[in-house]
């Protein structure tokens, strides 16, 4: 392979790797994830029910 082509490919790959490692802005969880956790929370509240009732 010609040295100039090798150097060009090296620079292109280095740019790709740099782009992959750049910090991404904090993102909100996807709607599907938020909905799933909300359903789990509601299910746990329904399953546990109210606490024990004190006898009179």
Image: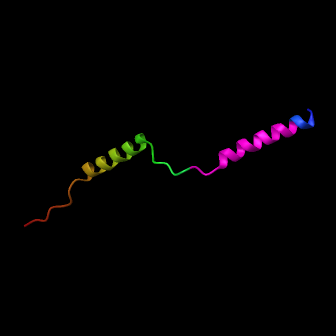
Q: Nearer the viewer, residue 6 or 42?
A: 6
**Percent position (x, y) of residue 19?**
67, 45
- Taking the view exactly as shown, the residue that stands out farthest to the left is 56
Quick one: quadrant of the N terminus? top right
The chief SS type of the magenta part is helix
Q: Give the range drawn in magenta.
A: 6-24
Residue at 51% across, 52% down: 26
The mark tally for this picture is: 0
**Residue 46 is inside the magenta segment:** no
Residue 23 relative to residue 34: left or right: right
For residue 53, above or below residue 21 = below
Q: Left or right: where does residue 33 sit relative to residue 11?
A: left
Q: Tell me the quarter of the picture where residue 39 sits.
A: top left
Q: Identify the residue at horizontal 13%, vertical 65% (top origin).
A: 54
Which of the pair 54/8 is nearer the observer?
Answer: 8
In the displayed structure, 2 sits above or below 35; it is above
Q: Which residue lies furthest to the right in this view?
A: 2
Q: Where is residue 52 in the image (x, y as percent from the top left)?
A: 19, 61
Q: Quadrant of residue 35?
A: top left
Locate the C terminus by quadrant.
Answer: bottom left
Residue ID at (54%, 50%): 25
Residue 36 in percent (x, y) is at 38, 43
């Amino acid at each position: 392979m010609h040295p100039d082509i090798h150097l060009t490919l090296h620079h292109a790959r280095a740019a790709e790797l740099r782009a992959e490692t750049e910090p991404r802005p904090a993102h909100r969880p996807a709607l599907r994830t938020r909905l799933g956790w909300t359903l789990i929370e509601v299910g746990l509240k329904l399953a546990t029910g109210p606490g024990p009732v004190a006898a009179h």
